[in-house]
Amino acid sequence: MIVNLLIKMKKLLYISGILTFFVLMSFMYVDFFSSMTKVDYIDGSKTLKFTTKMNTSHISDAIKINPNTAGFEAEVKKYVNNNFDVFVNGAPKTITFTGSQISGETVWVYFETGGVSDITTLKIKNTILLSAFPKQINLVSVAYKGSQKMMNFQRGKEVNEVSF
């Protein structure tokens, strides 16, 4: 009987130890740094439209301006223009900023590039937030004439290219 009681106590201690470990792990602070960009080809206007989703506090920290101030959108525009380059079939394309929107913890940034008739290769240089956050990961999803491609950007891999 004492042996059974000791076995039950040992199991109880083991289970409570595991539960304590998981409870303590749930309080660890882990900040995840990422942006996501969706690229859509609009055949009628021969345009690539970009929609980028970023964390509000992360972009605010990177550009050193409060998102509630009047100059925030202008700084976001300048930041995106300096940290996102597009090359279609080897030729650089000019990005036109079309707007941004703050929705709680998310900033949506909209930009485009025109004069894109056919894409053989699409090369993107995406350094958004990479200098501010070493563990930043930027994902880009490209939709072109029924084909879907994914790109991944991080420190050391700031340029990526896909073929269609």
Image (cartoon, grey):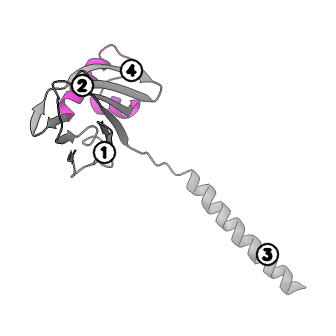
Q: Nearer the viewer, residue 148 or 15?
A: 148
Indicate the position of residue 156 as horizontal and vertical percent values: 21, 52
Residue at 58% from the left image edge and 52% from the top image edge: 26
Q: CA distance from mark 2 to mark 3?
A: 65 Å
Q: Secondary structure at mark 1?
A: strand
Quarter of the image for the C terminus: give it. Answer: top left
**Earlier residue among tags 4 and 1:** 4
**Earlier residue among tags 3 and 1:** 3
Residue 58 visible from this viewpoint:
yes
Residue at 81% from the left image edge and 76% from the top image edge: 8
Observer-side mark, 3 or 4, equals 4
Q: Secondary structure at mark 2?
A: strand
Residue bearing the label numbered 1:
149
Q: CA distance from mark 3 to mark 1?
A: 55 Å
Given the image, on which type of amino acid does mark 3 rest? Answer: Met
Given the image, on which type of amino acid does mark 2 rest? Answer: Glu
Q: Secondary structure at mark 4?
A: strand
Residue bearing the label numbered 2:
112
**Earlier residue among tags 2 and 4:** 4
Given the image, on which type of amino acid does mark 4 rest? Answer: Gln
The quadrant holding residue 66 is top left
- Circle 3: is it few (<14), some (14-19), or many (20+) Cα within 10 Å? few
Residue bearing the label numbered 4:
101
- Circle 4: is it few (<14), some (14-19), or many (20+) Cα within 10 Å? few
Residues drawn in magenta: 55-84
